[in-house]
Amino acid sequence: MLKLLRMNRVALGWLFLFPVVLSSWAKNDPTIVLFWPNQSNPSLKLSFGKFNQVGAYNGQLSLESGVLIQNLSGKRIPQASFTVYMMDKGGVRIGNGTLSVNDLEAGQQAKIAFQVESVGIPASLRLVARNDASGIPTSTKSVTLKVISIPPGATLKADGQDVGLTPTTIALTVGNHVLSISKEGYATGSTPVEIKADDTPGGSITLELGGLARDNVELRDGTVLQGDVMSVSMSSVVVRVNGKDQTYDRNRVKKILLVERMEAPPAAEVQPAASQPQR
């Protein structure tokens, strides 16, 4: 009889705990809100609900909180993993646990049950991205890439932003990018580059610049004409653009780049075959 009563008391204890745990999900008001990597330019917003005690052993509390995670990066995050440090009112760490989320689309939210062991109820939290590569939120993960051009010394742009002269090493975040290179005397070139979440640093890419197909005439107002320079005199420059000749005052012209033109060899004269004497 005594054993039966003890079992009933344990069962009643678990029935009492279940409403307490579920109440953390029922309340939508977060107790602690964190932004990662920072509040000024966040990729993730994490809203922690009330921490509820679900068990205790030798001074250690088992706590659970419902965490609402929102992707603010504008890109899909395949995986993100953090160590959550729990602090008391004096800033002393009283516990830590791991929080992970997978396949979070841009703007999407996910609710996760976060369980942790602690010696008290936390007053504040701190996030640290996991050191292993698979745990770094891939919306902000970057991979180094060495860019080489033929010829070297070309101006390199990544997604329209100047990043230096080739050869150079740049860091690109996970996703799709466009690299473009330009060099005086050569045609501007560009290429798409995709950085994947499992790419490792240290790769390289080589881009070859093509020669100009047309003469380039740069005016002092920044206009660039591509065509054929027909003549240059002390007073004017004549440029043929799309089959039409355009004349510009020489003082309006800042720079002229002339492409090398190969002259076609003269047509060989066909000599008639010598007539054979009739026999």
Image: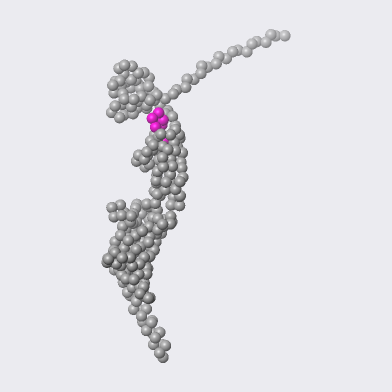
Quarter-of-image position of residue 104:
bottom left
Is residue 172 covered in magenta?
Answer: no
Instruction: Give the vertical position of 33 relative to 8 (above or below).
Output: above
**Residue at 32% across / 74% down in the picture?**
20
Provide residue 25's location: percent of width, then percent of height: 32, 68
Quarter in which the C terminus is drawn: top right
Viewer can see residue 277: yes
Instruction: Give the vertical position of 168 relative to 216 (above or below).
Output: below
Provide residue 253's location: percent of width, then percent of height: 31, 23
Provide residue 223's location: percent of width, then percent of height: 31, 29
Viewer can see residue 191: no
Pick the residue in front: 50 or 152: 152
Is residue 189 covered in magenta?
Answer: yes
Quarter-of-image position of residue 46:
bottom left
Pick the residue in front: 73 or 268: 73
Quarter-of-image position of residue 28:
bottom left
Quarter in which the N terminus is drawn: bottom left
Colour basis: one colour
Name the outermost residue toward the bottom. 1
**Residue at 43% across / 34% down in the picture?**
152
**Residue at 36% across / 82% down in the picture?**
12
Span highlighted in magenta in the image: 183-190
Q: Please state the total of marks drawn on the protein image.
A: 0
Pick the residue in front: 245 or 142: 142
Provide residue 166's location: percent of width, then percent of height: 41, 37
Instruction: Give the vertical position of 257 relative to 166 (above or below).
Output: above
**Residue at 34% across / 60% down in the picture?**
127
